[in-house]
Image: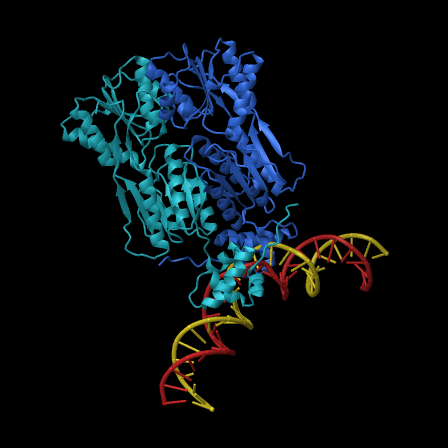
Chain colours: A blue, B cyan, C yellow, D red
Amino acid sequence: MSMKKDVINIYDIAEMAHVSIATVSRVVNGSDKVSEKTRKKVMAVIDEVGYTPNVFAQGLGLNTMHTVGIIVPTISDLYMSNAVYYLQEKLRSYGYDCILSCSGFELDGKQRHVNMLLSKHVDALILVGSTYAGNGEHVQDTDYIREAAETVPVFVVNGNVQGNNVYCTVNDDVKAVYDATSKLIEHGHERIMFLTDSQSYSAIKKRKGYEQALEDHDIPLRAELEMHVINRMHAVRDQLMECKIPFDAVVATNDEIAVGALKYAFAKGIMVPEEIAIVGYNNSGIAIACEPELTSIDNHIEDICYQTVDRLIAVIEKNETKIERKIAIPCDMVSRGTTEF
Amino acid sequence: MSMKKDVINIYDIAEMAHVSIATVSRVVNGSDKVSEKTRKKVMAVIDEVGYTPNVFAQGLGLNTMHTVGIIVPTISDLYMSNAVYYLQEKLRSYGYDCILSCSGFELDGKQRHVNMLLSKHVDALILVGSTYAGNGEHVQDTDYIREAAETVPVFVVNGNVQGNNVYCTVNDDVKAVYDATSKLIEHGHERIMFLTDSQSYSAIKKRKGYEQALEDHDIPLRAELEMHVINRMHAVRDQLMECKIPFDAVVATNDEIAVGALKYAFAKGIMVPEEIAIVGYNNSGIAIACEPELTSIDNHIEDICYQTVDRLIAVIEKNETKIERKIAIPCDMVSRGTTEF
DNA sequence: TCCTTGGTTGAAAGCGCTTACAAATATTAT
DNA sequence: ATAATATTTGTAAGCGCTTTCAACCAAGGA
């Protein structure tokens, strides 16, 4: 027996304040066509009895609930959990709540979750992460995103989807990896290994930065130095153990992988950074758990999230029309013990 | 211009199927008083046009939206993000969605978020984490929780709140730390340091386990060996550097702190586990990022979350009345390189 | 054949709120 | 003072759904 409190509604307030429900509604919604006197009178009653409008009834009329849906593939990942944190914090500052949805990496999961959120009448959708499948294959089909965007604006964080009413916020990963790789080269490293766990949008950009840096420094690109790994530290370590090709530096697409490389070095008795330099990505918590601590590229999730939300509000509240479809946020490198610079 | 699709409603379906809206409603809600023939007819139309009931309208009548509110102090913490992940996964399997809310550690934040979620008409509330303030002080006032519980059942994960309609799921932290400490003692450690970052409900239980183990092994409890630290690795390391008292083992209330101790040992050139053994708590991702890898107590968040949700469903759907107010889940230790056992 | 019974279906009354429109009141111009 | 206008307030019609209650219909018993 869930003893629900008898909840007071707009009629009660209207009666107690000796006005009509329309007036109460106007006061609650801050309409300007209410005299100061009645506004005060009504507010007094509202404050006294502690009235909150019923969101369902509001939603029925307005078809909005000041709620945005956030879809992440998983939240057990520092990048994602941080993103969710910053997104929801910023959204709340604008008076919006968020419904969280962990969809997994598969396409049909994402589609299902998008539909579910749409059926909840969210005011907008935020998709965090790549639009690619977890198995490394590029998902051609982002149609479901464009379809959702017909109902509600869609914001993609760290992914690239083209479409009307779809807005993307990404990192300048190409430049970040380009700079990191260049710096390694300038410090004498020649056999730089690129470790990646996926073919996601951002992984592809990172690879492009790596490739470009080598090219610009006249270092031939070697297929053997590019390795696809499983995104778990021990798996990376073991995979590197099998690897016969010598290398003197590692650029990884995330910190887990980088720590895996560090573990490999430790297991083989290789000195870091003297014999092998390592650069991670994301500058997550584990970057400072290991020893030596990890040099890592900070992608400023906070900025990305804040800017995403700012644009979201601009679109759904101010109905602004000339919002850029895609913006890029710069990254920067945080130097620690796994590099000499 | 957010071009909303013209959404089809129950009247459309009724018209297309040549029945009344009442019948459509019955079909949608799986009422048993519909003849098989009409059910098929209606379902055919629904499938064809892809109709989903408007949640607001449903909510208005039923006053529920199959949604539960989850409040965590922060999500940028492995424990919390994992908890949220498991909770929402399990909830979804029962057809419930969740609204996430990061309240911060302060009391008034929590109160505000509770009220906000209640105003959204969630069917239940899940509070993750302690009912204590972040500054280490025990918050006497859990009244707001009991008050919320008058409206909706409240489930506390890893915290202890007494009250009608309040259900708690906790770890057996006392036993976990008791066992770990005992094991250290049995392996010859005598000066065991207890590192904690808060006075939270679970921290207090952990301390009790530590104390009890010492007592049962006739080792005097020394105040100097109990240290309150800031929950960041480097801060812990630095704080230990200041510490003059010799010790040969560390029991930490979470893995960050334990890694801080490891960093201290590394900085001082102390061998781990030979000279100092270290036991962490939570068995989080960073436990395997460091070297040697961290022995840590696994608190089975997954189990806790699943059981919480199971009980939640039992309460709100099956209206079961004899649900235990509080259950405890055992922990177990995962041995790695920072201990000799 | 007529009446009862049980199973199906439909009509209509909310649920609590927003808002267009009309009514009432206050303000200003004539 | 009266008319015209501006401002404030109230009336009532939805929004899309659930659900009670009454109406309907087929089948079986009297």
Is residue A86 left or right of B167 when viewed as pictured? right
Q: Position of residue B103 (x, y in %)?
A: 44, 39
Total marks placed = 0
Q: Position of residue A341 (x, y in %)?
A: 47, 12
In the image, B244 versus A217, the foreground residue is A217
Is residue B328 left or right of B114 when viewed as pictured? left
Q: Quadrant of residue A319?
A: top right
Q: Is residue A84 visible?
A: yes
Residue B204 position (above or below residue A188) = below
Residue B9 position (above or below residue B135) = below
Quarter of the image with the N terminus of chain A in it: bottom left
Q: Is residue A11 visible?
A: no
In the image, D29 versus A128, the foreground residue is D29
Residue B68 position (above or below residue B298) = below
Q: Quadrant of residue A294?
A: top left
In the image, B181 versus A81, the foreground residue is A81
Residue most extreme to the top: A188
Q: Position of residue A153 (x, y in %)?
A: 59, 42
Q: Position of residue A159 (x, y in %)?
A: 54, 33
In the image, A50 versus D2, the foreground residue is A50
Is residue B316 left or right of A30 when viewed as pictured? left
